[in-house]
Amino acid sequence: MTTVASRTFRSTPQRDALQTWTAIVDLLTQCKTGAARSELLAVAGVAASMIADQAPKDAAIVTTCDGPRTRIYCIYDDDAIEGSDAKEDALGFDPLKGDWRVSLPCPADDLAWVEGALKQHSSRITARDLDAAVTMDDAASATKTEGLVLDPKRFLGS
């Protein structure tokens, strides 16, 4: 079982979609400059478009790395203004440690152009249909695995 951290960001009208993405990038990079921050900011327009479409309202932006998985949601409208459901505090770990990936939820009608636009800037940042879940298989195929791999069925004797 993978450890998962979850955060919820206030979006429109509290902050616009681009400001929301910048706040998410600040969380993921722990406000540090460097290659990861540059890569995340390079897709700001595409990510902001998904945030403006409210894709991460019910389907998380998912970050996988050599540590815990991070799920990021956005709240909108009155919920964003009121803010009681927001949780934007720092994570207790580096969410971009090692071979990291970010999966953006995307409406099915926009998936083709979003995937194409993301590929121009990053191989680590991808899009998925917002109705599709990110599975452990997706995370394993997106990252390099070295050493031992735990087979839960064999481990538990099932």
Image: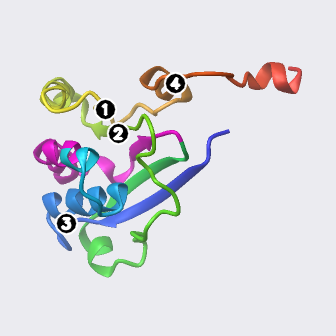
Give the quarter of the image for residue 122: top left
Which mark is first along the chain, 1 or 3?
Answer: 3
Mark 3 is surrounded, within 10 Å at the Cα level, by few (under 14), some (14 to 19) or many (20 or more) other residues, namely many
Q: Pointer 2 and pointer 4: residues touching (CB < 8 Å)?
A: no
Up-down relation of residue 56 to residue 133 (above or below)? below
Q: Pointer 4 and pointer 1: residues touching (CB < 8 Å)?
A: no
Give the foreground label among 3 and 2: 2
Q: Which residue is mark 3?
A: 12
Q: Pointer 1 and pointer 2: residues touching (CB < 8 Å)?
A: yes
Q: Pointer 3 and pointer 1: residues touching (CB < 8 Å)?
A: no
Mark 1 is surrounded, within 10 Å at the Cα level, by few (under 14), some (14 to 19) or many (20 or more) other residues, namely some
> Could you tell me which residue is drawn at 55 percent across and 47 percent down?
68
Instruction: Give the number of the disc on residue 87.
Output: none
Q: Which residue is mark 2?
A: 102
Which mark is first along the chain, 2 or 3?
Answer: 3
Of residues 33 and 122, which is closer to you in this image? Answer: 33
Which mark is first along the chain, 4 or 2?
Answer: 2
Up-down relation of residue 79 to residue 100 (above or below)? below
Amino acid, disc 1: Arg
List the single residue furthest toward the right.
157
Mark 4–mark 3 distance (CA, rounded to whole Å)? 34 Å
Q: Which residue is mark 4?
A: 140
The magenta span reads 39-66
Whether the magenta-drawn stretch holds residue 60 is answered as yes
Instruction: Give the number of the disc on residue 124.
Output: 1
Coloring basis for residues: rainbow
Mark 4–mark 1 distance (CA, rounded to whole Å)? 13 Å
Mark 3–mark 2 distance (CA, rounded to whole Å)? 22 Å
